[in-house]
Amino acid sequence: MLDKKDRAIVSFLQYDGRTPYTKIANELSVTEGSVRQRVKRLVDSGQLQIVGIVPPEEMGWTEAGMIGINVQANRIAEAAEAIAQLSEVSYLFQAAGEFDLFAEVYCKDKEHFVSFLNNKLQKIPGVDRTQSFIILKLHKLSYRWGDSEMPHKETINSKKELEYKS
């Protein structure tokens, strides 16, 4: 679990992953070295990823969809592990409801999407059935959650720790 200083640093980086550590340190009244060490620890432990986000269509991946996946009983973990390895899958989660798993998939075109379904996804052991939901128009692409604005000094309390709204 991240402590308050880690969460404050992550809030800055969620808004702009290129925020200089000196700026974060100044806003949080800590040293730049402290910010650098905390970010390194979070990245090394896998708790934080700092990546460039580009709308997929800008990279030539024009066919996107969510795929509901039904899996044979007692094979969900095995199937999820195999599906997670597929390069077209950007997001995979287990869900309650009609489908066991949902995958967000990006492909170069319709032919690639069909090939992905027929030659990769549906050949994974344990996958019983899939239902595709083609994304017609992307209205929002963001990996920010929680506070949607960059934290400012006025949101930091007297102990110099970021306050979070419930």
Image (cartoon, rainbow, N blue to C red):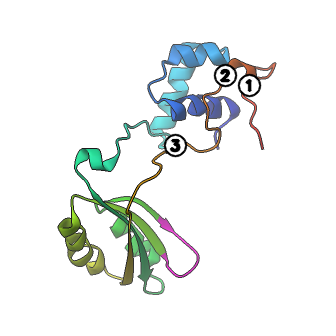
Give the answer, above or below, for where 70 lies relative to 87. below
Residue under label 1: 155
Q: CA distance from mark 3 to mark 2?
A: 23 Å
Q: CA distance from mark 2 to mark 1?
A: 6 Å
Question: Badge 2, how many Cα within 10 Å: few under 14, some, many 20+?
Answer: few
> Could you tell me the amino acid type at mark 1?
Thr
Q: Which residues are magenta?
A: 93-100
Give the answer, above or below, for where 60 lies relative to 150. below
The residue under the point 27% across, 74% down is 117
Residue under label 3: 47
Q: Position of residue 71 (x, y in %)?
A: 43, 82
The residue under the point 74% across, 36% down is 164
Q: Is residue 8 magenta?
A: no
Give the answer, above or below, for where 148 lies relative to 29. below
Q: Position of residue 81 (x, y in %)?
A: 38, 67
Dominant SS in magenta: loop
Determine whether label 2 and label 1 are within 8 Å by CB: yes
Dividing the picture into quarters, in which one does residue 18 lie?
top left
> Judging from the image, what secondary structure is the residue with disc 1 in?
helix
In primary-sequence order, the first of circles 3 and 2 is 3
Residue under label 2: 152
The residue under the point 54% across, 42% down is 144
Give the answer, above or below, for where 92 lies relative to 13. below
> Could you tell me the amino acid type at mark 2?
His
In primary-sequence order, the first of circles 3 and 1 is 3
Q: CA distance from mark 3 to mark 1?
A: 24 Å
> Could you tell me the amino acid type at mark 3?
Gln
Q: Nearer the viewer, residue 43 or 106?
A: 106
